[in-house]
Image: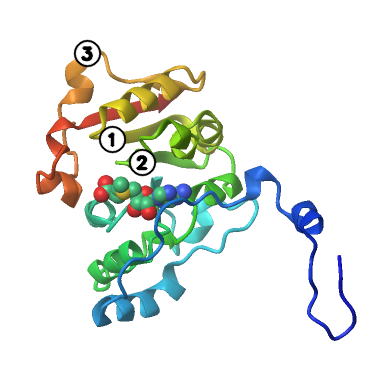
């Protein structure tokens, strides 16, 4: 470490490394966090709602403490994109508390603009790495987790970036209640296979599918994301992978 009083502290590479957080406490965010500048409406919604709804991550965080009134169930949606699915959930189930995590500011702002006229007493958000939040949640505190259309990271050398991994499933297993749901979807065959392999071989999870139709057909009451709704390339090839916390 190099430095003298009143001067800017310069850390050597070795010191920076020794001060770095352990691997499991580091943010693992890949991909974009902002694209074009926010338009006026999204910027306004972001500036008004973000301070009210954002979660301060702290150790032993219990989702129950995030909402002004008691909620029947607590659910987390990881990587909600523009939040169409989350918006529909919070509107149709005001009795539940929802936590949405999306590190991409344009997605977060689009979501906040859409919900600006809602009561917003059953939604809280984080604009960061969802795993960072999960690591800080208390044991068995969630009734379900949604991971819809996660980034596929198709190159083999990038597979370790995939959000569904053994390490992250260990974390999900800890924070989900027994019998809780882990609901995942993708239109990428290679990723579907990966998700099934990772989750099926995890001792804490049980695949609810009994036949191909159970993961090939759109589940009852499924809320389609805009991507699925618009019939975008690949959206006719969805896999719905629903696991239960044993
Ligand atoms: C392919 S998009 C899908 C968006 C949305 N779920 C949908 O189905 O339309 C994947 C999303 O995951 C988000 N994401 C990537 N890594 C994440 C992480 N570590 N924590 C939370 N969200 C993440 C990305 O910013 C992106 O918006």
Q: Badge 2 is on which residue?
A: 147
In front of the other: 147 or 58: 147
Q: Residue furthest bottom?
A: 6
Q: Are marks 1 and 3 in contact (CB under 8 Å)?
A: no
Q: Looking at the image, tell me whether mark 2 or mark 3 is earlier in sequence order.
A: 2
Residue 110 rendering spot, x and y as whole percentages: 27, 66
Residue 137 rendering spot, x and y as whole percentages: 57, 47
Ligand 1 within 8 angstroms of badge 3 C-beta: no
Ligand 1 within 8 angstroms of badge 1 C-beta: yes
Q: Secondary structure at mark 2?
A: strand
Q: Are marks 2 and 3 in contact (CB under 8 Å)?
A: no
Residue 147 rendering spot, x and y as whole percentages: 36, 41
Q: Is residue 72 visible?
A: no
Judge from the rendering whether residue 218 lies leftward or rightward of residue 58; answer left or right: left
Judge from the rendering whether residue 73 lies leftward or rightward of residue 224; answer left or right: right
- Residue 101, by quadrant, is bottom left
Residue 5 rendering spot, x and y as whole percentages: 89, 83
Identify whether 3 is placed above or below 176: below
Identify whether 223 is placed above or below 204: below
Badge 1 density bin: few <14, some 14–19, many ≥20, Cα 10 Å = some
In front of the other: 117 or 36: 36
Q: Secondary structure at mark 1?
A: strand
């Amino acid at each position: 470490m190099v430095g003298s009083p009143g001067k800017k502290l310069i850390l050597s590479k070795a010191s920076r490394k020794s001060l770095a957080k352990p691997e499991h406490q580091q943010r693992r965010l890949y991909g974009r966090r902002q694209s074009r500048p926010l338009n006026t409406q999204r910027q306004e919604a972001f500036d008004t709602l973000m301070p009210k709804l954002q979660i301060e991550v702290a150790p032993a965080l219990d989702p129950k403490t995030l909402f002004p009134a008691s909620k029947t169930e607590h659910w987390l949606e990881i990587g909600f994109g523009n939040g169409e699915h989350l918006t529909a959930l919070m509107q149709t189930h005001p009795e539940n508390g929802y936590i949405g995590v999306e590190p991409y500011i344009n997605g977060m702002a689009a979501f906040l603009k859409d919900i600006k006229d809602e009561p917003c007493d059953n939604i809280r958000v984080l604009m960061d790495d969802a795993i960072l939040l999960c690591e800080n949640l208390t044991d068995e505190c969630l009734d379900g987790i949604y991971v819809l259309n996660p980034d596929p990271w198709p190159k083999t050398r990038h597979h370790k970036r995939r959000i569904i991994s053994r390490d992250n499933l260990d974390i999900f297993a800890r924070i989900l209640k027994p019998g809780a749901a882990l609901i995942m979807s993708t239109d990428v065959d290679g990723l579907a296979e990966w998700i099934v392999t990772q989750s099926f071989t995890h001792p804490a999870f049980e695949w609810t599918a009994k036949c191909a139709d159970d993961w090939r057909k759109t589940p009852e009451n499924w809320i389609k994301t805009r991507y699925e709704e618009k019939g975008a390339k690949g959206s006719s090839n969805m896999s719905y992978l629903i696991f239960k916390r044993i």
